[in-house]
Image (cartoon, rainbow, N blue to C red):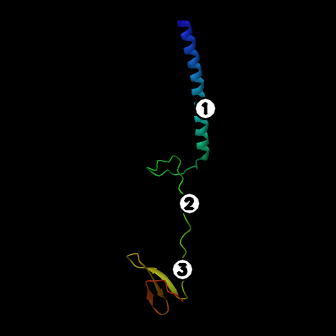
Amino acid sequence: MVAGDRAKTEALFLGTKSQVEALEAQIAQKNQQIEELKVPGAAVPSGSGVVGYVPPPPGPPPSQPQLPSGWKKATTPEGKEYYYHETTGETSWSVPVS
């Protein structure tokens, strides 16, 4: 009976070993696929929980309003934008219209 148990144990071990090897091969294949999908140099946000996270590209820059002739945009020392007319000296906090 010991010899029979040993044979069953070896058969079970070999079957399990081959299943483990097959699963490890699948894992290696999936890891390779993941590496191929990663963008080089892509940053992963801290705490995102996403491996290989690639942030979306930035949107287009905001369009600048077309100023009427003679108007210029300037910035106060505090950083607030305003507009002034070079000839008349008129100023405005909002974008002037023609």
Which residue is pictured at 56% across the width and 60% down the height? 57
Task: Give the residue displayed 54% in from the left and 69% down from the top.
Answer: 61
Residue 90 screen position, x and y as percent: 45, 91
Residue located 51% across and 86% down the image:
71
Within 10 Å of disc 1 (Cα), the crowding (few <14, some 14-19, many 20+) is: few
Of circles 3 and 1, the one toward us is: 1
- The count of marks equals 3
CA neighbours of label 2 inside 10 A, class few (<14), some (14 to 19), many (20+): few
- Residue 27: image quadrant is top right
Check residue 65 in the rendering and tell me which mark sits there, or answer none.
3
Q: Is residue 17 above or below residue 45?
A: above
- 72 or 10, nearer to the observer: 10
Q: Quadrant of the C terminus?
A: bottom right
Location of mark 1 (residue): 25
Tell me the CA gap for discs 2 and 3.
24 Å
- Give the number of the disc on residue 79: none
Q: Position of residue 77 (x, y in %)?
A: 38, 77
Q: Residues within 10 Å of mark 3 (few under 14, many from 20)?
A: few
Q: Where, quadrant-wise, is the N terminus in this rendering?
A: top right
Residue at the spot of label 2 = 57
What is the CA distance from the residue labelled 2 to the residue labelled 1? 35 Å
Residue 43: x and y in percent read 51, 51
Residue 64 position by quadrant: bottom right
CA–CA distance in space, label 3 to label 1: 59 Å
- Check disc 3 and give the amino acid type: Pro
